[in-house]
Image (tube, grey):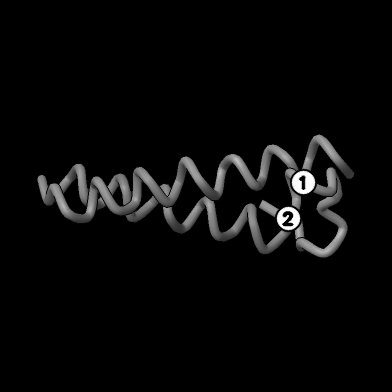
Amino acid sequence: MKTWRYRSAKDLSLTMFICFCLGVFLWLIYGIYMSSKPIIVANFVTFILAGTILYFKIKYD
């Protein structure tokens, strides 16, 4: 929210968000492989939100 409001993402680490998104994506793949709906839903939502923050980080920096 702060990143979007102030159009600044300088306080966020790009490396950390890339690693976080990769980890969430791998959990999503694992959930799909195991056919676990709770893991799939939770990680899909998290991946979308983290991906949005990553997009703003790349766009505003």
- The answer to whether marks 1 and 2 mark residues whose Cβ atoms lie closer than 8 Å is yes
Residue 35 is left or right of residue 46, and the answer is left
Q: What residue sits 81% from the left and 53% below the top?
A: 9
Amino acid found under the numbered disc labelled 1? Arg
Judging depth in this view, the residue of 14 and 56 nearest the camera is: 56
Amino acid found under the numbered disc labelled 2? Lys
Q: What residue sits 38% from the left and 52% below the top?
A: 26
Q: CA distance from mark 1 to mark 2?
A: 5 Å
Residue 46 is left or right of residue 16, and the answer is left
Q: Which residue is mark 1?
A: 5
Q: What residue sits 76% from the left and 62% below the top?
A: 13
Q: Is residue 11 above or below residue 38?
A: below
Residue 33, image quadrant = top left
Q: Which percent across, then down, holds residue 21?
A: 53, 51
Q: Which percent across, then down, holds residue 36?
A: 12, 51
Q: Which residue is mark 2?
A: 2
Residue 37 is left or right of residue 12, and the answer is left
Residue 27 is tagged as none
Judging depth in this view, the residue of 52 and 35 nearest the camera is: 52
Element at label 1: helix
Q: Is residue 26 above or below residue 7?
A: below
Query: Label 1 neighbourhood size at 10 Å, few (<14), some (14-19), many (20+)?
Result: few
| Farthest-out residue, front | 5
